[in-house]
Amino acid sequence: MKNAKPTSPFNSYQKGVIPLLAVVQFTIVLDFMVMAPLGDLLMKTLDLNATQFASAVSVYAFSAGIAGLLAAGFADKYDRKKLLLFFYSGFIGGTVLCGTATSYEWLLLGRIITGLFAGVLGSVSMAIITDLFSFEQRGRVMGFVQMAFAVSQVAGIPIGLYLANMSDWHAPFLMIVVLSILTALVILKWMRPVTKHLEVKLNVNPLAHLQNTVTKKTYLLPFLTTALLSIGGFMLMPFSTPFIINNIGISQLQLPIIYVITGIGSIIILPLIGKVSDKAGKFPTFIGGTILAMIMVVIFTNLSPIPLWSLIGINTLMFAGIMSRMIPSSALMTAIPRLEDRGAFMSINSSLQQIAGGIASVLAGLIIVQERNGKLDHFDTLGYVVIFIMILCAVLMYFISEQVARKLRVASPKEDTVSHEVIV
C-alpha cells in the first residue's frame, strides 16, 4: 500500500510525547532483558537451578499476556493517561520487589507482578500513539519508540551489569525503579489527558466489550498475523547466545561488544526505517525488511566460526531486517481498530505477542538439540522454520495493508487523524 500523502510534521507537544513514551518503553524492555545477563549471578546468589531460573523468566511473559487480556475490556473506558500512570505504578512496585528479593519465591512474585502491569503498559502506549498521531506520522513515531530495544543494549544492560558487579544483582532493578519514578512524575505533571476515545459512548460492559473485540471479523486476521510475527521473531532469541558462544566460538567476554555495537547501529537505523515507512509506504517497507531478514537468517543460522567483526556485521544487518518488519507492521496495526475499540484491540494484540513469544521458545526447544560439548544441532532447521513463517506473514500483511487502505479511503476525521486537542 503506497502512501501518497506527504509526511506530516510533528507539533511541539507531539515532539515531547515521543521521547516520553520511548523512555517508558525503555524501562519495560530493560526490566525484561536484564534478567538474562544477570542469570549467572542470580543462580549463584539465590542457589537457583536452571528450571527455577527459566521459570522466573517465563512467568513474566505469561503473566503479561494474561494481564493484557483481562485489561482489554476496560482499556477504552478511562483516560489513557490515567491508565498509563496506574499500570506504570504497578510496574514500579513489581520492580521494587525484584530489587529487594532475598529468595526465589520473592523474586518469582516480583516477576509475576511486574509482568502483570508491564503487559498492559505497551498496549496503552500504542493506543496513545494511535490517538495522538495521524497514520502518516506513525512510522516515524514507531521508529523512535522502538529505539528502546537498541538503547537498552547500548546503555541499559552494560550500566546494569556494571552496577551489579560493583554492588550486587539487585542494583539494576533499583536503577530501573529510580528512572521509572522520574518518568512517572513527568507524565503526571506534563502530559495532557488522552480522552478523545471517550466521546464515543460504549453501551456494553467490559466483558462484553472484550468478547466483541476478540470476535470482530475485521480484527481476526490482524490478531493471527500478530501471533505469527511474534512466533517468528522470538524463535531464534532464546538460543542465539548459546549458538554464538558454542557454535561460532565467541567468548562470554566478547558478548557485550556485540550488544553495544549492534545497538548503536540500531539507534542510527531505526529512525531511518520509520521515515522510509511513512514516505514509501508501510507494506513496501515491510516486504523489503522481510527479504533482508530472510537472507540474514539463512546466513546467521548456518554460520561456522568467524571473526567477531564479521559476526557483528551479520547480526546488525539481521536486526535491521527484523526491525524493518516490526516498525511498519506496528504502524499498520494501529490503523485497524475503530476509535472505541483501540484500547481493547491493543491490549489483546500485546497479550498475543507475549503468549506467542512463550510458545515460540517452547517450539524452538523442541527443534534444537544440544550436544555434550555444548554445540547446538538443528539451528539451521530453526532458521528455515522462521523463514517459512516470515513468508506467511508477508502474505497476511498484504491483506491487512489492503484492509487499512480501504478504511483510510472512507475514514471520518475521528477515526484515524490526530486529535484536535494536540494540534493546538
Image (cartoon, rainbow, N blue to C red):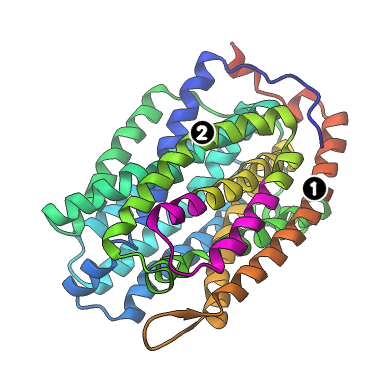
Q: Nearer the viewer, residue 416 or 1?
A: 1
Q: Is residue 386 left or right of residue 34?
A: right
Q: What residue lies at 39% left-to-right and 74% top-to-bottom?
A: 246
Label 2 element class: helix
Real-space Cα separation, disc 1 to disc 2, in angstroms: 23 Å
* Residue that extends furthest to the bottom in the rendered view of this protein: 372
Residue matched to label 2: 144
In the rendered view, would you say 223 is above or below 144? Answer: below
Quarter of the image where one finds residue 297: bottom right
Q: Nearer the viewer, residue 80 or 405?
A: 405
Q: Earlier in the sequence, mark 1 or mark 2?
A: 2
Where does residue 110 sit, x and y in percent of width and height? 31, 62
Question: What numbered label is drawn on residue 400?
Answer: 1
Badge 2 amino acid: Phe
Q: Is residue 140 left or right of residue 15?
A: right
Of labels 1 and 2, the one closer to you? 2
Quarter of the image where one finds residue 420: top right
* Residue that extends furthest to the left in the rendered view of this protein: 167
Q: What residue lies at 56% left-to-right and 38% top-to-bottom?
A: 78
Q: Nearer the viewer, residue 306 or 325?
A: 306
Q: Which residues are magenta?
A: 289-315
Q: Main secondary structure of the magenta part?
A: helix
Tell me, yes or no, if residue 110 can be seen here. yes
Question: What numbered label is drawn on residue 264?
Answer: none
Tell me, yes or no, if residue 80 can be seen here. no
Badge 1 amino acid: Ile
Where does residue 40 sit, x and y in percent of width and height? 25, 69
